[in-house]
Structures are given as C-alpha cells and as structure tokens.
Image (spheres, grey):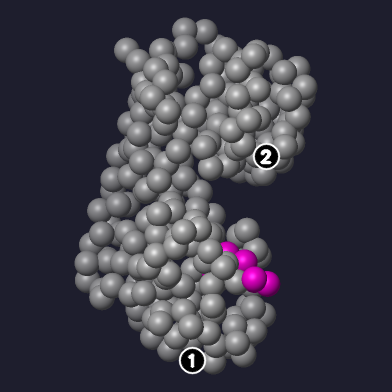
C-alpha cells in the first residue's frame, strides 16, 4: 500500500527503523504522539513540544535557514517538510542525500485526518493514527454542536503589531476559526497575512482576537488596543491552539469550543 503526500508523491511503508528529521514543529509533536519518539533524530529550534522528548534531539536550525550539513550528518532516512513553513530551494537541496522527503500542506482542520493516515501508514503506526482520527472526530462534532447554537461572528485575528497584521481567509488559522463560527476579516486579501487598518476593521468586527504567537500579545496589549480602537471588544487567544496542526489540532478544537462558549457567556469582554 502507498500513501500520497501534499505534492502527490507516493510513499511506501518503510520496512526498517526510520531515522526522521522533522522541519515542522507541529509535526514533530504529531510524530511523538504516533509513537515515533525513538525514531526522531533531529528537529528545528522551533520544535518545542513535547519538551521532554525534543530537548534531547539535535537542532539543525530554523524552519527556514536550517543547516544542510548538520542535517546531512544525522543520516536521516526521512525528512518531514511543509510547503508554507520551509523554503522550497532549501528543501530541494535535501533531495541529493535524503532518501525520502515527505511534503505536507494542511489547509483546513480536517486535513489533519490525512496527515494522520500519511505518517501513520508510512511508519507503521496505523492504530495510533486511527486513535488520533477518532479523537479528532469527537472534538470536531462537539465544536460543531457549540458553534451551531451561537450566531456566526466577524472577527479580526491579529498576529503582529507595528504594523498590525491579520490573517486571510485562505489560511489554516482562518479555517480553524471558521469551524468555531468565527469568520475572519478582511473578507478578501491578496496577502495571506495582510497588514490591516485597525480602526476600520476593528469597527467592522464583533470581536478582536490577539494571538499569543508569533507576536506574544499579553494583557497589556488589550489596554493598548482599547486606546487605538476604544469601541472594539477584544480577547486573548492561544495561537498554538489555532495554528498548530497535527495532534495539537485535537486539543485546538476543544480549546476553541470552550473559548467560544466562554466569550458567548460574557458579552462585555
């Protein structure tokens, strides 16, 4: 049996013990949750979960600008990459010595089910992948039930300041939020992470969400936002729960369900 990755490349089940380098933080976590911790031989500096596992793994640099030579020295059988998070030219350079490059590109929450099947299949972890898929479906159904009982809302999701940056609707983040009944602004954008006019869009939004990453928004930023857009209703949101795919998405769906219900009960937030 074969499994297809994001660029249509077919991958067979690997019959030996793999040596895996992950260049995608959320998929490092997924590999561990699939029972492959002992097969990981390298990671990026941004691969921070689960800490007790990743702290023993050699770092090859960042998701972009990683060291080819450090990675080569790890003698990987497989390198896990992502279309958005890794540079194409750097990934292509790996083809000279990495036997198996697995390319990923989840664009929506339910794409995680395909990720579970792909990595579970290639590395012989189908039971673990099936368990993750079942857990995902339970949380997806629970979130859908909560969202169905509440009106859809326009939200401005901010990931940066100076300039203020939001998210376009063709991003994974926006589609995760949409599953909770939150439709992001702007409605249309040529950029995936556009600079936004805060005063204008905060006025159109029913809620402004300040993400904990990549900019670490905190309570003091809520006060600054109130100065810039005094009529805006705003709240903090855990960015990892919305932007990290893989196994984290299961917790992300549960987190969004709780957050949506909590904010609905406190309309003055």
Residue in view at x 59 percent, y 83 percent = 225
Please rate how many residues cluster around mark 1, counting C-alpha atoms within 10 Å: few if below 14, some from 14 to 19, many from 20.
few
Count how many numbered circles sit on residues in the image.
2
**For the residue carrying disc 2, how many other residues have a C-alpha within 10 Å: few (<14), some (14-19), or many (20+)?**
some
Whether 203 is drawn above or below 6: the answer is below
Q: Is residue 18 left or right of residue 162?
A: left
Of residues 253 and 135, the one nearer the viewer is 253
Q: Position of residue 247 (x, y in %)?
A: 45, 42
Q: From where the camera sits, is residue 176 visible? A: no
Helix, strand or loop for disc 2: loop
Q: CA distance from mark 1 to mark 2?
A: 39 Å
Query: 86 or 242, which is in the foreground?
Result: 86
Q: Residue 138: in sight, yes or no?
A: yes
Q: Position of residue 81 (x, y in %)?
A: 55, 32
Name the residue beneath numbered marker 1.
Answer: 231
Tell me the tag on residue 75.
none
Residue at point 42%, 31% (across, down):
6
> What residue lies at 60% left-to-right and 37% top-to-bottom?
86
Element class at badge 1: loop
Circle nearer the viewer, 1 or 2: 2
Instruction: Using the rendered view, name the quadrant where residue 218 is placed.
Output: bottom right
Helix, strand or loop: magenta stretch: loop
Which residue lies under the disc numbered 2?
A: 64
Q: Which residues are magenta?
A: 158-163
Does 180 sit above or below residue 28?
below
In the rendering, at what x and y percent does residue 254 appear? 39, 57
């Amino acid at each position: 049996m074969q499994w297809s990755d994001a660029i249509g490349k077919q991958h067979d089940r690997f019959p030996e013990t793999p040596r895996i380098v992950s260049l995608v933080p959320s998929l490092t976590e997924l590999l561990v949750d699939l029972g492959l911790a002992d097969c990981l031989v390298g990671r990026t500096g941004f691969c921070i979960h689960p800490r007790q596992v990743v702290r023993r793994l050699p770092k090859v640099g960042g998701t972009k600008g990683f060291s080819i030579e450090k990675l080569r020295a790890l003698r990987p059988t497989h390198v896990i990459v992502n279309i958005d998070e890794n540079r194409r030219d750097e990934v292509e350079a790996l083809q000279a010595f990495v036997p198996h490059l697995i390319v990923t590109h989840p664009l929506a929450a339910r794409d995680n089910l395909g990720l579970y099947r792909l990595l579970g299949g290639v590395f012989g972890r189908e039971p673990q992948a099936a368990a993750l898929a079942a857990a995902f479906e339970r949380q997806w159904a629970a979130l859908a039930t909560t969202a169905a009982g509440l009106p859809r809302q326009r939200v401005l999701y901010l990931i940066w300041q100076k300039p203020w940056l939001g998210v376009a609707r063709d991003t994974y983040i926006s589609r995760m939020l949409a599953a909770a009944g939150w439709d992001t602004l702007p409605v249309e954008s040529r950029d995936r992470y556009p600079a936004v006019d805060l005063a204008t869009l905060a006025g159109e939004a029913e809620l402004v969400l300040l993400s904990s990453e990549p900019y670490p928004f905190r309570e003091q930023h809520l006060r600054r936002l109130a100065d810039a857009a005094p009529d805006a209703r705003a709240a903090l949101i855990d960015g990892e729960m919305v932007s990290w795919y893989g196994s984290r998405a299961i917790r992300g769906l549960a987190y969004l369900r709780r957050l949506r219900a909590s904010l609905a009960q406190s309309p003055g937030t």
